[in-house]
């Protein structure tokens, strides 16, 4: 993606958070990552995979859209809370999203359980990621599309599924790929580097205002320590071990949000989870 992060990094400042890369794990999925109770879950565009603490596969669902009445073909970044997976499901093709669904899946069977009543007049045009905030009982979603709709994080009630409003990020990152909640703040990943020029992507923190109408954005980390620059994706925080987990793809050329062809030396896209130890 050819977008610079200069404005955000220069105006918003740099967080004091420290992230030390500890390990890298190949995974079967290019979209999202979440962790709970010693297990990891990874989403592909059309798959869900559950791993144990040693990254052994313990469950897979390669047909996750069974039972939907609207046409859907894409899962973004995911989250988990009390052994339930939260997914943003939609139909996505060549940069255009429709039929957005906020869906809850069983974290063991990886099968759908229920769907939130999605509010269609919020302005959200795509759903690239989802995050659960158990403290305020809020589910947040973000959008990848590069227009005014992606300036916001959209909020739903965790218990009832009702729409709660939207939070304007100031200043707003672009090309959002994932969102996560940790200790009162939200964190978003942005595909704002240029892999063709070996420019890295970024993570930003978002501190909500008291009324959650706005969120102050600060540059949190520049991912110049990945194996090769490519496409940043979802993220999650492992509070038990004080770690950040980030999904990063390399090898494929991304056009309008979709893999189309490969860089020299690659014959397939490689999907990896980077694990960082945190000091905050």
Image: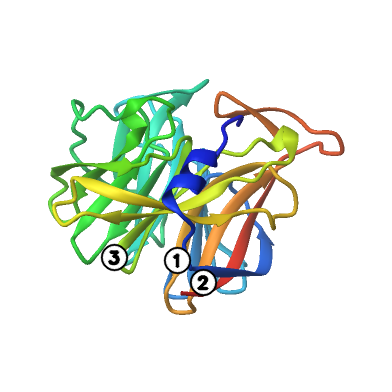
Q: Alpha-carbon neighbours of circle 3 within 10 Å: few (<14), some, or many (≥20)?
A: few
Mark toward the start of the polypeptide (3 vs 2): 3
Residue wearing tag 2: 243
Mark toward the start of the polypeptide (3 vs 1): 3
| Picture disc at residue 237 | 1
Residue located 41% across and 62% down the image: 108
Mark toward the start of the polypeptide (1 vs 2): 1
Residue located 65% across and 54% down the image: 272
Residue 102 position within the rendered picture, expressed as x and y whole percent measured from the top left: 29, 41
Asked if residue 87 can be seen in this view, the reply is yes
Where, by quadrant of the figure, is residue 103 drawn?
A: top left
| Picture disc at residue 184 | 3
In the displayed structure image, the side of residue 30 where residue 184 appears, left or right: left
Q: Nearer the viewer, mark 3 or mark 1?
A: 3
**CA–CA distance between discs 3 and 1?**
12 Å
In the displayed structure image, the side of residue 260 where residue 159 appears, left or right: left
Query: How is the model colour-coded?
Result: rainbow
Residue located 59% across and 45% down the image: 201
């Amino acid at each position: 993606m050819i977008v610079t992060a200069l404005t955000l990094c220069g105006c918003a400042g740099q967080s004091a958070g420290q992230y030390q890369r500890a390990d890298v794990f190949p995974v079967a999925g290019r979209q999202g990552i979440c962790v709970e109770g010693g297990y990891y879950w990874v989403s592909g565009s059309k798959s869900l995979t559950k791993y144990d603490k040693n990254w052994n596969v313990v469950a897979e669902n390669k047909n996750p859209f069974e039972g939907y009445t609207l046409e859907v073909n894409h899962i973004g970044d995911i989250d988990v809370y009390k052994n339930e997976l939260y997914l943003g499901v939609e139909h996505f093709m060549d940069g255009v999203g429709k039929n957005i669904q906020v869906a809850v899946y069983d974290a063991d069977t990886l099968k759908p359980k229920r769907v939130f009543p999605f509010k269609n007049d919020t302005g959200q045009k795509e759903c690239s990621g989802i995050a659960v905030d158990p403290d305020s009982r809020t589910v947040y979603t973000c959008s990848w599309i590069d227009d005014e709709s992606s300036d916001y994080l959209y909020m739903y009630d965790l218990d009832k599924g009702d729409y709660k409003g939207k939070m304007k990020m100031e200043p707003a990152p672009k090309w959002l790929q994932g969102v996560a909640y940790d200790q009162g703040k939200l964190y978003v990943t942005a595909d704002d580097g240029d892999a063709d020029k070996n420019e890295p992507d970024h993570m930003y923190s978002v501190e909500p205002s008291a009324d959650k109408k706005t969120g102050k954005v600060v540059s949190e980390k520049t991912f110049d320590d990945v194996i090769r620059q490519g496409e940043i994706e979802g993220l999650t925080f492992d509070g038990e071990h004080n770690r950040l987990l980030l999904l990063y793809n390399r090898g494929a050329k991304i056009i309008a949000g979709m893999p189309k062809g490969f860089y020299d030396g690659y014959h397939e896209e490689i999907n990896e989870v980077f694990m960082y130890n945190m000091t905050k």
